[in-house]
Amino acid sequence: MANIVFTGISARSIMNWYPALEILKNRGHRVEAMLLPHLPDPDSQNLDRHGYQRIGVLPITEHLSRIDPAESRSLAIRARDIIQTAEPDMLLLTTCHAGPEAELAGLFMELSVRPTIVGCQHGFVQNWEVYWSNFHFDYFLVFGQYFQRFVPDTLRQRVLAAGLSKLDSVTPAPRPDFTIDQRPILFAAQSIFTAELHRTLIDLAAIGDREIVVRPHPEFRESFRKLAERFRILDVEEALDEQIARCSLLVTTGSTVALEALAAGIPVVVLPEQRGHFYQDLGIVTDRVDAADILRLASLQSGPQWRLRVRDFLQQTTGSSHAERSVVCADCIEAILVGPPQASPQEV
């Protein structure tokens, strides 16, 4: 059995992959955490409450967008030294696009004797060139085959579709068509608050004749404080799937939350802000930030043909149309541990 060390800076980035790691633990592998909590992010505080078996904790006190490169490298060196004492067979980096985790990958790749280095996709919308131009990994895991289209030919055999394992906890439930479902509309915020967005949500509440509830982004909880003057703000610590179950529609921008909502079977409309246009392949992106356009797209999301489109999209973007993504991911990681996996023709 193998010894796997994973790194993480926030609860949400770890949970993308941790269900698969739990399966590997149940199969007899040793799984331990090297935590680098990103303290400016509220979602990164008290990471130990999740019960990970830890080999070390090194807090990141400065925001990743402002951290001094020397400080980032110093943290990475300290983390490398701790990880080396654990003698892992694999190092799995759950957030490796910036900061000490990105530095850590490069430090290990310089060593002649080292564990297998595996990077992981962080969210649905990514600046892929950041990964490809600094590819300090043996392998890189993406949520599904959909994302392999962004991979340059020189790296195609090293980028593997592994499944978004956290979605296995999401169970779709029967629900009425949106046109007759009078439950609240859930707006899942990201980082940027605009007057246009504020005005659109006010219009949506009036035209849609439904309550608007707002779930802040775990990191940017204060960005949408002004919305509390008009709308109910949900507790970000409550499970997203429980909040989705109480609503008739989810509205968001370029957030991975849209995948969770689609897996739950709720209508989803994405606004073309904050890179929301990347969801255009499913036809759920509005032409503009407009309440009437949101309601128009929501009303179209019903019937067997629509459900088939959603299943196909989830299969391509998350590794499965229903469940067992964690098993797919665990199998992928084990294949790496056993020997170099080869991408199938379907995966490339």
Image (cartoon, grey):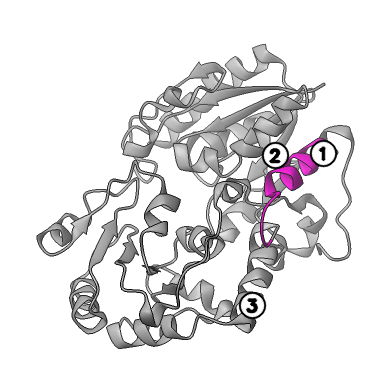
Report the Cα–Cα distance between label 3 and label 2. 31 Å
Question: Pointer 1: residues within 10 angstroms few (<14), some, or many (20+)?
Answer: some
Q: Earlier in the sequence, mark 1 or mark 3?
A: 3
Label 1 is placed on what type of residue?
Answer: Ile
Q: Which mark is residue 118?
A: 2
Residue labelled with disc 3: 309
Report the Cα–Cα distance between label 1 and label 3. 32 Å
Q: Is residue 67 above or below residue 147?
A: above
The residue closer to the viewer here, 18 or 336, is 18
Q: Which mark is residue 336?
A: 1
Q: Is residue 203 above or below residue 51?
A: below
Span highlighted in magenta in the image: 321-335
Disc 1 + disc 2, Cβ < 8 Å: yes
Residue 1 is situated, as x and y percent measured from the top left of the image, at 82, 21
Magenta span contains residue 326: yes
Question: Pointer 2: residues within 10 angstroms few (<14), some, or many (20+)?
Answer: many
Q: Quadrant of residue 110?
A: top right
Report the Cα–Cα distance between label 1 and label 2. 9 Å
**Residue visible at 43% across and 27% down?**
47
